[in-house]
Image (cartoon, helix red, strand yellow):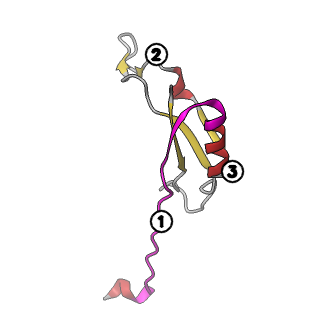
Amino acid sequence: MPTARIFQRPKSSMQSGKYRTDRWQLEFEPAEAKRPDPLTGWAGSGDTRDQVRLGFATQDAAVAHCERQGWDYVVVPAPKPKLKLQAYADNFR
């Protein structure tokens, strides 16, 4: 049975907005380790489930999909947002 990991996408450090951070994503755990291709040197494996990424609007929808398919799943809780509140004048202390 494949083991799926359900998580909420984190905000990219390259963006200032919160685009698609409210969506939940489903990915499969790798079944085998990646190995370098002798011809190109790129990392790859024979596991095709590594290429599958499904997006869901809610955590419950992702869990329901896994249960419908009969997959084992692990839900990774969403990280708490860290707010650093400070005044502009604090930069010059």
| Amino acid type assigned to the residue bearing label 3 in the image | Ala
Q: Camera-side residue: 61 or 40? A: 61
Q: Do the residues labelled 2 and 1 touch (CB within 8 Å)?
A: no
User: Could you say which disc has been placed on residue 46 in the image?
Assistant: 2
| Amino acid type assigned to the residue bearing label 2 in the image | Gly
Label 1 environment density (alpha carbons within 10 Å; few <14, some 14–19, many ≥20): few
Which portion, as a residue range, is magenta? 66-89
Q: What element carries label 3?
A: loop
Q: Is mark 2 on a helix, strand or loop?
A: loop
Q: Residue 32 magenta-drawn?
A: no
In the image, residue 21 above or below residue 26: below
Q: Camera-side residue: 66 or 28? A: 66
Q: Which of marks 2 and 1 is nearer the N terminus?
A: 2
In the image, residue 87 above or below residue 50: below
Q: Earlier in the sequence, mark 2 or mark 3?
A: 2
- Residue 15 in the image, given as x and y percentages of width and height: 54, 57
| Amino acid type assigned to the residue bearing label 1 in the image | Lys
Residue, x 41% and y 89% (percent of image)? 89
Q: Camera-side residue: 78 or 39? A: 78
C-alpha gap between disc 2 and disc 1: 36 Å
Q: Quadrant of the C terminus?
A: bottom left
Residue, x 43% and y 28% (percent of image)? 30
